Image: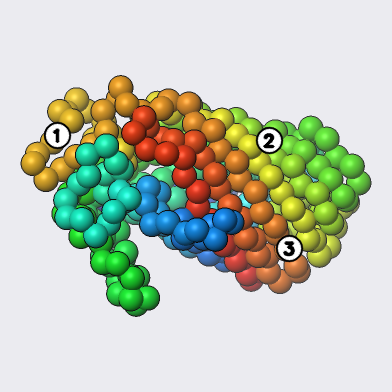
Amino acid sequence: MKIRLITMLVISMAIGNNNNSMAQKIHHIQPQLFKISFDDDYFNYRLKGTDKYYTAGLEFSLYFKKHQLSPPETNQEQQGLSNLYFISLKQTMNTPNEISRKGFQKGDYPYAGVLSLSYGKIHSEKSSRFTNTISVGILGPQAFAGQTQTLAHDIIHYTKPAGWNSQIKGQLMVNVMAGYEKAILTVGNRLDVTGNASLNAGTIFTNAAAGLTLRTGRINAYFNNYESIHLGGENHFKKAVYFFVSPSIKVIGYDATLQGQIVNQPKYISKDVYRIDADSINHVIGQVHFGVKYEGRKMAVSVSQYIQTAAFSSVSHHEYGNVSVAFKM
């Protein structure tokens, strides 16, 4: 019953349901972009791939605009930059260092998988951007992370993971995220610097982050465009190729993929299930994200690398890569 109610809520949000009159609820949905994003720690700038910690993530996202049909409005969307909305489906997974061993490995990452459905809004202005997202889903066997990793490894004839029976058990996911970006420096179409901050709260992840993003090369105006989508303004979209680097600091309140359900539980939930206790968690994490990106009129492609400091006291820093492809619709 709860899952049905949550699903109905997300669908109603996606079609523009609000508390205004019935006439104001009528929107024309205009698909803009379909994006596939793939994380994997086997992609490594040092050419020394691993299969551990945050080991893989796959996300499918559909971006669209909503145009109100009746009655007409004189609002920000008509006068300036268009709001952009998105729905995404994402699966992520954590594993310990030696996946060929059965069960959990004390002092290492617990097996954990998350499957989530998100709905969000991106509101851009001349020199700033707000992003709001609500995510619902599940942490545990119902996320099918173990089956996904086993299938992928069977296809490429790689080590079969043997410890998914010890994964962190089921936890309903309800998370909300608010993000803000602000222009700091712009040098023509060759370089810009943007500050960013975010707050994430819910049953799976609770954290706050802040950082900077520097882009250099041939770039488009950051807030007038998103991937290959022109949102409005005088700076029209052109093909772009650039390097980017984004250092950030994250303060961790709670991470259920490491700590289990957000209730008091012993470190050993059972003989087969393991989690990290709060005293071992590093509550301040540093991260650097860097890579190259191409933005064309029909598609955008990026290849990048993440490097982050250790999530808790008994593990090392972690590196993983990302490949993202977006197709304009």
Q: Which of 184 and 88 is in front in this view?
A: 184
In space, the residues marked 2 and 1 are separated at their CA atoms by 39 Å
The image quadrant that residue 259 belongs to is top left
The residue at the point 71 percent across, 49 percent down is 244
Q: Which residue occupies 22% across, 39% down?
A: 106
Q: Earlier in the sequence, mark 1 or mark 3?
A: 1
Residue at 55% from the left image edge and 48% from the top image edge: 306
- The quarter of the picture where residue 230 lies is bottom right
Q: How many labels does the image show?
A: 3
Chain-order first, disc 2 or disc 1: 2
- Residue on which disc 2 sits: 212
Secondary structure beneath label 3:
strand
The residue indicated by pointer 1 is 268
Q: Which residue is drawn at 26% across and 44% down?
A: 110
Under mark 3, the amino acid is: Glu
Q: Nearer the viewer, residue 310 or 292?
A: 310
Q: Is mark 1 on a helix, strand or loop?
A: loop
Q: How packed is label 3: few (under 14 Cα within 10 Å), some, or many (20 or more)?
A: many
**Three-letter amino acid code at disc 1?**
Tyr
Q: Which of marks 3 and 2 is in front?
A: 2
Spot the residue most to the left. Answer: 271
Closer to the camera in the image, 212 or 200? 212
Q: Tell which residue pokes out farthest to the right in this image.
A: 188
